[in-house]
């Protein structure tokens, strides 16, 4: 059987293109194998299963046989390409420029995203500053007030115009050419001042009493999320149905006991302060890690390959459910963040491989055990749950990152500010 020919036609950091030529004999052999598969499966009137003539099968299942043949040819070509070029792909290749004519070689191109070849000359000797923000009494009180708001009931308000932080129940209907009746009335509930409605709408709501309506022309702000609506105006009829206001519980010992095992308000404040302190410690550690990665990137001139950046941007867009029409704007706004993410991942992956720091099965088991103890559940149950949700990889990745940063920080000097 002739050899499948693979020729690298383009290479750049993180990506390569390969031209593939499959001889006609190979194509014919793959077609025959696909035909035999369908002969075994075919159930056609007048023939016993497995006894349908090849010519009949080829005519009846022509498209399916062609698809199965191509799948086999692509898989075999990809194995040849990986072995010949010693590729390190990060995903399956894309197929472009397919040409397939009877009796001629099948040709196409593999476009493949690759793990870039990276060699970091300097991983240590950096000077880093770790600064833990001091926790103030004002921050404690702010968190305490947030807890009070979370526990406060909403009480209807009668005979008063709403104000900021009130919960309003409104009906907003679009009016065309200023004519009544309005079209498509829609009920909404939101808290004033949280940005759930455009400023013009909130302003008019705050001038109504419950039960009142107003016809108005409102304008979408210039920075509105939907670009097509920026600066546009709408004629609406606005009806305020109900206003509710929170009555905050008094910050006293009774409130503290409602929030948990606290004997007094001061004990609750102390716990809030301790929790805020722990968060400040975590933020300080995160800042040091970011500073360290930045210095490694600069010292080694690490580049973020375009294909990997595009992959990260795609993941961001999917996570944020960005509509297709906003993709270009989104990609432009988040490209810098995506590039930083790619450089960070490249550095961490290099250290993992060069220092053999990948999480072990024993370390993963121990971590799951710790998590299970915190949640008060059997470790085996949590392990099965994480495995089913395909999140064990995330746990392993977190262990690996801790090992990587432990190693990297040991190679540099961290000063406490």
Image (cartoon, helix red, strand yellow):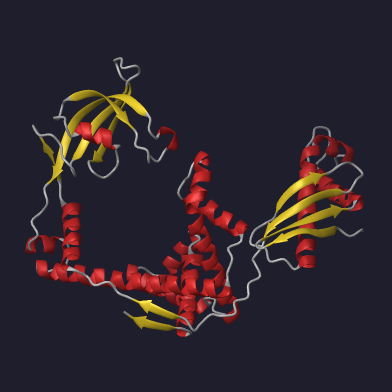
The correct choice, above or below, for 201 with respect to 142 in the image is above
Looking at the figure, which quarter contains the C terminus?
bottom left
Q: Is residue 253 visible?
A: yes
Q: Quadrant of residue 62?
A: top right
At 34% from the left and 16% from the top, the residue drawn is: 177
Nearest the viewer among 245 and 13 is 13
Q: Is residue 68 visible?
A: no
- How far across and how far down the image is residue 412, in percent? 46, 83
At 49% from the left and 80% from the top, the residue drawn is: 408
At 24% from the left and 31% from the top, the residue drawn is: 170
Q: Give the total number of marks visible in the rendering.
A: 0
The correct choice, above or below, for 406 with respect to 113 in the image is below
Q: In screen coordinates, is 344 left or right of 51? A: left
Q: In screen coordinates, is 88 left or right of 171? A: right
Q: Quadrant of residue 6?
A: bottom right
- How far across and how far down the image is residue 191, in percent? 23, 42
- How far across and how far down the image is residue 153, in percent? 15, 47
Q: Quadrant of residue 379?
A: bottom left
The correct choice, above or below, for 60 with respect to 37 in the image is above
Nearest the viewer among 324 and 369 is 324
- How far across and how far down the image is residue 47, in percent? 84, 36
Looking at the figure, which quarter contains the N terminus?
bottom right
At 80% from the left and 62% from the top, the residue drawn is: 80
Q: In screen coordinates, is 275 left or right of 120? A: left
Nearest the viewer among 217 and 347 is 217
């Amino acid at each position: 059987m002739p050899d499948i020919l693979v020729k690298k036609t383009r290479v750049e950091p993180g990506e390569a293109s390969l031209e593939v030529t499959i001889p006609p004999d190979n194509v014919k052999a793959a077609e025959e194998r696909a035909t035999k598969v369908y002969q075994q499966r075919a159930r056609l009137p007048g023939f016993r299963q497995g006894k349908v003539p090849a010519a009949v099968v080829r005519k009846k299942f022509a498209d399916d046989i062609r698809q199965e043949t191509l799948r086999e040819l692509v898989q075999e070509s990809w194995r040849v390409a990986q072995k010949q070029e010693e590729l390190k792909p990060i995903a399956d290749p894309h197929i472009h420029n397919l040409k397939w004519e009877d009796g001629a070689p099948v040709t196409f191109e593999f476009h493949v995203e690759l793990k870039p070849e990276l060699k970091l000359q300097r991983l240590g000797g950096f000077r880093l500053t770790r600064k833990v923000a001091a926790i103030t009494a004002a921050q404690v009180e702010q968190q305490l007030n947030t807890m009070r708001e979370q526990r406060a009931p909403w009480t209807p308000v009668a005979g008063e115009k709403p104000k900021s932080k009130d919960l309003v129940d409104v009906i907003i209907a679009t009016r065309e050419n200023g004519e009544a009746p309005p079209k498509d009335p829609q009920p909404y509930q939101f808290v004033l001042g949280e940005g759930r409605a455009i400023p013009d709408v909130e302003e008019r709501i705050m001038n109504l009493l419950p039960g009142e309506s107003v016809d108005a022309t409102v304008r979408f702000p210039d920075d509105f999320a939907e670009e097509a609506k920026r600066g546009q105006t709408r004629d609406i009829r606005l009806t305020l149905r109900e206003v509710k206001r929170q009555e905050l519980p008094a910050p006293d010992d009774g409130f503290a006991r409602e929030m948990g095992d606290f004997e007094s308000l001061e004990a609750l404040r102390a716990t809030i302060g301790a929790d805020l302190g722990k968060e400040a410690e975590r933020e300080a550690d995160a800042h040091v890690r970011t500073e360290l990665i930045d210095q490694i990137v600069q010292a080694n001139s690490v580049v973020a390959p375009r294909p990997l950046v595009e992959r990260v941007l795609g993941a961001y867009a999917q996570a944020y459910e960005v509509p297709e029409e906003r993709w270009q704007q989104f990609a432009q706004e988040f490209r810098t963040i995506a590039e930083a993410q790619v450089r960070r991942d490249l550095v961490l992956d290099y250290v993992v491989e060069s220092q053999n720091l990948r999480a072990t099965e024993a370390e993963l088991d121990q971590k799951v055990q710790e998590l299970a103890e915190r949640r008060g559940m059997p470790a085996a149950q949590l392990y099965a749950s994480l495995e089913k949700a395909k999140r064990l990889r995330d746990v392993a990745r977190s262990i690996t990152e801790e090992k990587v940063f432990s190693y990297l920080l040991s190679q540099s000097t961290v000063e406490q500010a």
